[in-house]
Amino acid sequence: METRGVRIFMRVTSVLVLAFLYVPLAVIFLYAFNSTVGQKWPPSALTTHWFGVAWRNTEVREALFTSVRAALGATVIALGLGSLAAFAVHRFKFFGREALSFVLVLPIALPGIITGLALNSAISSSGLSFSLLTIIVGHATFCVVVVYNNVIARLRRTPGSLVEASMDLGADGWQTFRYVIWPNLATALVAGGLLAFALSFDEVVVTIFTAGPQITLPIWIFNNLLRPTRLPQVNVVAMVVVLASFVPVYLAVRLTREPAPGRFPAEVVPKPQEQLAVASAAV
Amino acid sequence: MARPTPDTEQRTPPPERARLQAAVRLEGVHKRFGDVTAVDGVTLDVRQGEFFSMLGPSGSGKTTCLRMIAGFETPTSGTVLLLGRDVTRLAPYDRDVNTVFQDYALFPHMTVGQNVEYGLRVKGVAPEERRGRAAEALRMVRLEGFERRKPSQLSGGQRQRVALARALVNQPAVVLLDEPLGALDLKLRQQMQIELKAIQQRIGLTFIYVTHDQEEALTMSDRLAVMNAGRIEQVGTPAEVYEKPSTGFVAGFVGVSNTLSGDAAREVTGSSATITVRPEKIRMLERDERPGDGECSVTGHVRDVVYLGANTRYTVDLDPGGELVVLQQNLARSSMEALEVRGKRVRLAWDRLHSRTLARSEEGTGPPGPGEEGT
């Protein structure tokens, strides 16, 4: 058993680590309401003025819509490919099944800059032009993973006897899918989709390599970070990006937890380090 | 009847129809999984309306047999007949059988009512009718009014009953039960045994019940098959299987193994063939008492005494070698008196009719013969 000293030490360490993760974010949020252009601690007064300014900025608005479109596109592709791949790997035994599973999961571990570089040269040499479509494809490479992971975890957690029971009671393959498999899978798909959306929405590195003239919100932050007059708007946008990423992740965790209360949602792959990167860069 | 496929109906030759009396018939069924032979030549008739158990240790092939009847597995060779119709290669949804699964397999996203209605729903029965029939099935398992609950809100015993209602509501030709009471505690299990049997008798459907629990099989079955290593050792009523086990395996698996072979058997019966006798059939003679007519007897000394409350169990080392377990009711005997017998010399006796000569288990694969009665 741990002694009192150890227990206090562990509590303090936990608090410090969490503070290191979240205090910079809180500071960004606070600065988004700062009344002055320069960042001075503590803020002299609070205002929502910059939200209006950012919203009226067509550049920012364009970037927001581009981000949403890219994230939606990547999510749709990820849902299609990820769930189909999960079905195949779960249902059938075939040569190279383990390898396929590994190759699907790999992109999330690959450095974004390598993925970006590779996609960039592939797109250039294929003669395609850089556009929203290439951003979507680039994002889809790592979004497929989260859908795949969520769906396959759910499939593995769904007892095989449910499918057998359905067939036993007279349901054919399609009825079994419609009445038993699909309802059991729906929350996993929604969770996977939300995570894919969040991943795509705040992605910077791959976007730089696959975008044409399009600017997404994170890229806009990146471009405007060093312009002092834009700093208040950058903070506002950063806050929006963080919320747009955290809310889906939170919902995804809730969704995957619901069907099996008390069980740890092992299938969720939150990736907060990117938000953090934006936040600490902006501070 | 779930979707009869016309072509199979036509393929069934007229002589097959003469066997309609069997609800389920397995003919020379083998099932291999890779190198492992799970079922090794099983031939079996289950009559309509009977409660039939398949009893055996894990790995004896009983569940695989059940799964082949349900359609989840296809036999490597052999035929499965359902009411005289060859269903060997039919999908589960084309067979008029329903299964109660070991883990219940209730659909977690549906209410109890929706679970029970499921079989009717996929067959396109109108909502009105299926609601009525589901309510009736739930009443049968004493869960009326539970329609709106979710399976997660039920206890183990209640889930078990929902699983049963979900099978019964379709009024299948055969209900298959795969160790359905395995997850319940002892008290509830015994209560459910009685309840299951009562339901089966009331509705008159054919039940095939897989279990490794001999007491369960003896309690509920009209007939049972004892399985070992993919083969059937014996088929019979509980009394037949218990009192006249045809192989050493059956004698040991159903009840306490009490066998005599070699010299001990020769001393008792005059032949060295292995015999078995149930522990409660053996008397311990009083000091001057002689064995009666038609009784065989053997001497030994009591090695061990276990006082069990209602009974006392003695383990007796026999003078010609071997041992016998003797179970005696504590009619007028106190625990002190029972324990005093330890180490004493005793003479055991039992009616010749109660000892059975065993076929060797390795050979006991075919339908077991009527065994010699009395030795």
Image (cartoon, coloured by chain):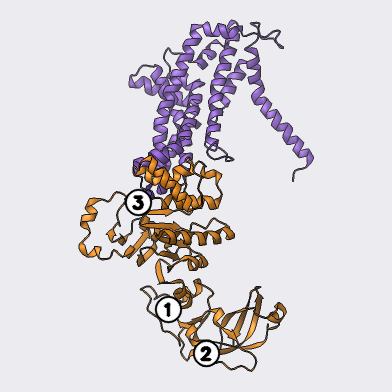
Chain colours: A purple, B orange
Residue B206 sits above or below residue B116 on the image: below
Instruction: Tell me the mark number nearer the camera, choosing from 2 and 1.
Output: 2
In the drawing, does residue B316 fall left or right of residue B203?
Answer: right
Q: Pointer 1: what residue?
A: B360
In the image shown, does B204 or A122 lie closer to the viewer?
A: B204
**Badge 1 or badge 3: first in the primary sequence:** 3
Query: Crowdedness of circle 2 by 10 Å Cα count: few (<14), some, many (20+)?
Result: many
Q: Which quadrant of the structure image shows residue A103?
A: top left
Q: Which residue is mark 2?
A: B296
Give the percent coordinates (x, y) of residue B30: 34, 63
The chain carrying label 2 is B
Badge 2 and badge 1 in a common chain? yes
For the question of whether residue A106 can be seen, the reply is no
The kind of secondary structure element at disc 1 is loop
Number of the label disc, if any, that sits on residue B92: 3
Residue type, label 1: Arg
How far apart are the two marked residues, 3 and 2, measured between alpha carbons? 54 Å
Question: What separation in Å lies between label 2 and label 1 (alpha carbons)?
Answer: 22 Å
Query: Is residue A21 positioned above or below B266 on the image?
Result: above
What amino acid is found at the position of numbered circle 3 in the picture? Pro
